Amino acid sequence: MANEETAEKPVEQDLSEGTLMSHLVELRNRLLKMLAAIVGVFIVLFPFAHKIYSTIAAPLNAALGEDETMITTNLIAIVLTPYKLTFFVAVALAMPIVLYQLWAFVAPGLYKNEKRFAFPLLGSSVLLFYAGVAFAYFVLFPLAFNFLVAFAPDDVAVMPDMSVFASFVVMVSFVFGLAFEVPVATVLVVWAGLTTPDKLAKARPYVFLMAFVLGMFLTPPDVISQTLLAIPVYLLYEIGLYMSRIFGRRRTSNEEEPAGPES
């Protein structure tokens, strides 16, 4: 009996190590595909780097007017900044492929009824991310830049640094893109059983306060930018509550269906 038990342990250990190694290989392949997608989009956008930079800088240039322009004190930034900004645009455009690769890695471990909800959530997360970036570009940037430039003293020439501007745009765009994922995050928290829609509904006052606190730390130091982040985040939280109730009811109705994770 002792010999049989000792013989079984190496077999179980080999199986676990083999499973772990296969998961690591799969993860590596998915990461390589994500990187290839980003690099591929960047190569396509590379010849248009200066055009992309000019397009993204249009709201600030409009706020500055014809007499004032951006400057740079770093000669290297003249060359690198447009391509740096183009790389982050490539990351944003490749986001559907990146999220799909994450989905493909996780999907084999999900139940069939869970896959029914996971795929719509994946599509929603992509659309909400782009909606957040578009909101930042078309709504926040024009209002914030005009507000900040208007508050400059009369004897001060407003000439922002181009590299600082690029870093600012990237940070704010991704912050708004992630902030607009609140409905998906709310559904996932309820779906995982960490809380219930009723408990989240009771936390509305705290969420409203936290939305303004996040707006204070993650946006430019003006009331307009903070409000433009806080209000959509809270409204998206309400949408997430509504979606979590719908998904919760549908998931409960499907729990009795025989399903198991795919091998």
Image (cartoon, grey):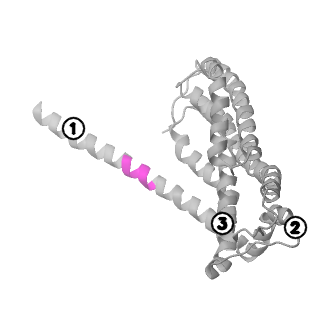
Q: Which residue is mark 2?
A: 65
In the image, is 42 to the left or to the right of 24? Answer: right
In the image, is 182 to the left or to the right of 193? Answer: right
In the image, is 238 to the left or to the right of 34? Answer: right
Q: Residue at x 72, y 25 (%)?
A: 242
**Image location of residue 67, percent across then percent down:** 87, 73
Quarter of the rendering occupied by the N terminus: top left
* Residue type at the position of mark 2: Gly
Residue 164 bears which disc, if any? 3
Disc nearest the viewer among 2 and 3: 2
In the image, is 258 to the left or to the right of 45? Answer: left
> Few, some or many C-alpha atoms within 10 Å of disc 2 (few <14, some 14-19, many ≥20)?
few
Q: Are marks 2 and 3 in contact (CB under 8 Å)?
A: no
- 79 and 130: which one is in front? 79
- Of labels 2 and 3, earlier in sequence is 2
Q: Which residue is mark 1?
A: 8
Q: Residue furthest front?
A: 155
- Of labels 1 and 3, earlier in sequence is 1
The secondary structure type at the circle numbered 2 is loop
User: In the figure, 130 relative to 166: above or below?
Assistant: above
Q: Which residues are magenta?
A: 20-25
Q: CA distance from mark 1 to mark 3?
A: 61 Å
- 43 and 140: which one is in front? 140
* Residue type at the position of mark 3: Val
- Of labels 1 and 2, earlier in sequence is 1
